[in-house]
Image (spheres, rainbow, N blue to C red):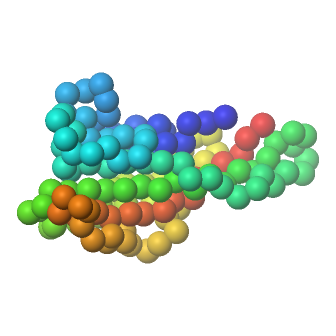
Amino acid sequence: MRDIASELAVLLEDAGIGLVRPPSPGANLFTAPMPDADGDVPARSVALVVTGGAEPQLYLGLGQAAYLVVHCQVRVRSGREDFQGGQQLALMVFMTLNQSCFRPQAFVQANESWPTYLGDDSSGRHRWMTNLMFRYMAR
């Protein structure tokens, strides 16, 4: 099986939008629920979490192959005084991931037409969310 969150994280890290994964210093790109912005975790962060998916559809003519749809939620957070920067990051993440192609035989599509603003958290940091569908053929 594929590690969908990690594959999407690699694409984001390679996009040149200032996101880096652990164990890099200042890591702000996670394949787990959004960590608190305490200590070494910046307020400006992105988290990718696989949230389930549709039932497999058997692909006729290819034996044990199945068409899989995996759902992944992307959360973006910015600092208290950085609404504009956070919104811009959410849009860059959206544009990077929506309709991106992966090999072999995979395609990513957003469920929404734009990142959804979730308001601020208990510490006043701004938050956005996008839901993605990752579709691929598995054997």
Residue 114 falls in image quadrant: bottom left
Q: How many marks?
A: 0
Q: Against 75, is 83 above or below? A: below
Residue displayed at 43% across by 74% down: 113
Instruction: Left or right? Give the position of 85 relative to 90.
Output: left
Q: Measuring from the top left, give residue 53's x and y in whole percent.
A: 65, 55
Q: Measuring from the top left, give residue 133's x and y in whole percent.
A: 57, 58
Q: Measuring from the top left, give residue 17's x and y in whole percent.
A: 24, 48
Residue displayed at 26% across by 41% down: 28
Residue displayed at 56% across by 53% down: 51
Looking at the image, can residue 114 be seen? yes
Front-lying residue, 80 or 93: 80
Quadrant where the C terminus lies?
Answer: top right
Instruction: Left or right? Give the position of 137 relative to 111.
Output: right
Q: Residue furthest left?
A: 81
Front-lying residue, 41 or 104: 41
Front-lying residue, 101 or 32: 32
Q: Residue furthest bottom?
A: 113
Q: Measuring from the top left, give residue 42's x and y in whole percent.
A: 18, 43
Residue displayed at 47% across by 37% down: 6
Q: Against 8, is 87 above or below? A: below
Instruction: Left or right? Give the position of 57 relative to 54.
Output: right
Q: Residue furthest front?
A: 122
Looking at the image, can residue 85 be seen? no
Residue 98 falls in image quadrant: bottom left
Quadrant where the N terminus lies?
Answer: top right
Q: Against 30, is 25 above or below? A: above
